[in-house]
Image (cartoon, helix red, strand yellow):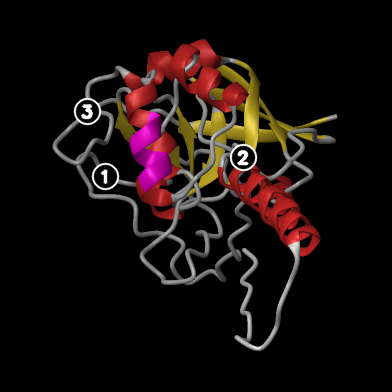
Amino acid sequence: MFYYTFNHKISFNMNHFKYLSTILFFSVMLLQATCQKTPVAEAASTEGTKKVKITTSEGTIVIRLYDATPLHRDNFIKLVSQNFYDDLLFHRVINEFMIQGGDPLSKNAQPGQFLGTGGMDMERIPAEFNKGLIHKKGVLAAARDGNPQKASSACQFYIVQGKKSTDQDLNAIQQNRGIPYTAEQRNIYKTIGGTPFLDMNYTVFGEVETGLEVIDKIAVVSTDQNNRPINDIKMKIEIVN
């Protein structure tokens, strides 16, 4: 916005007036165009050169890890190469939300034992947020505790199942959280589904390439009061060459 002040001793003719009027007109037009500009999410590639395979009693899931989140990608690959996840459980399962695993305490857990606190002694992974990486159905994301930096657990993860959203849902999130969804992202949430309320709160670092149906199968198993499956669902994760 441009502001003009005139000293009462300064005179100006009609040409001056036309000149200033022209400047003011284009300034207002520029301001209006800026205010009406549709917000655009940050660009983020979902490409990745590393893949992992998760084998469960309900089927096999192949996940591509994003190169755009290298800290999480490399940490996950390191743990997988150390066979860290073998025989751990999907210990928290909520239909139309997500399936969670990676707690090292789940390896030899007794039936009904509360899980989800394991790995607290491991160094957290700094958050790698990007508005271009959203919680659509099938994404791999890192769990975390309530630390103010929103740094991720070094080992616990979840895979989104979620549900379809409406424009009204997305408008509310965009207004309250300041997340500028693109037309493509809105279409994904409305047709494929996901958990948009988690965006920019938890780091997304990969997505399912094959095996979405396995997530749906796991999500509907019988669970106890802590959302732990009654019948253990173990995992084995290996790197795909």
Which residue is situated farthest in the left direction here? 225
Q: Residue at x 50, y 59 (%)?
A: 153
Disc on the earlier residue, 1 or 2: 2
Distance from Cα at disc 2 to Cα at disc 3: 47 Å
Secondary element type, mark 2 = loop
Query: Residues in magenta?
Result: 170-175
Image location (x, y in percent) of residue 24: 67, 56
Alpha-carbon span between mark 1 and mark 2: 56 Å
Q: Against 152, is 203 above or below?
A: above
Q: Please state if 131 lies on the left or on the right of 100 as rendered.
A: right
Tell me the element at label 1: loop
Q: How many marks?
A: 3
Q: Amino acid at mark 3?
A: Thr
Mark closer to the observer (3, 1): 3
Image quarter of the N terminus: bottom right
Q: Residue at x 48, y 22 (%)?
A: 189
Residue 97 appears in the figure: no
Q: Which residue is mark 3?
A: 223
Q: Earlier in the sequence, mark 3 or mark 1?
A: 1
Question: In which quadrant of the rendered view does residue 144 lie?
Answer: bottom left
Q: Mark 3 falls on what kind of element? A: loop
The amino acid type, in three-letter code, at marker 1 is Gln
83 up-or-down from 52: above or below: below
Q: Earlier in the sequence, mark 2 or mark 3?
A: 2
According to the picture, the residue beneath numbered tag 1 turns out to be 110
The answer to whether mark 2 and mark 3 are in CB contact below 8 A is no
Tell me, yes or no, if residue 107 can be seen here: yes
Foreground label between 1 and 2:
2
Tag 3 and tag 1, C-beta contact below 8 Å? no
Identify the residue position indicated by label 2 in the image: 37
- Specify the amino acid type for callout 2: Lys
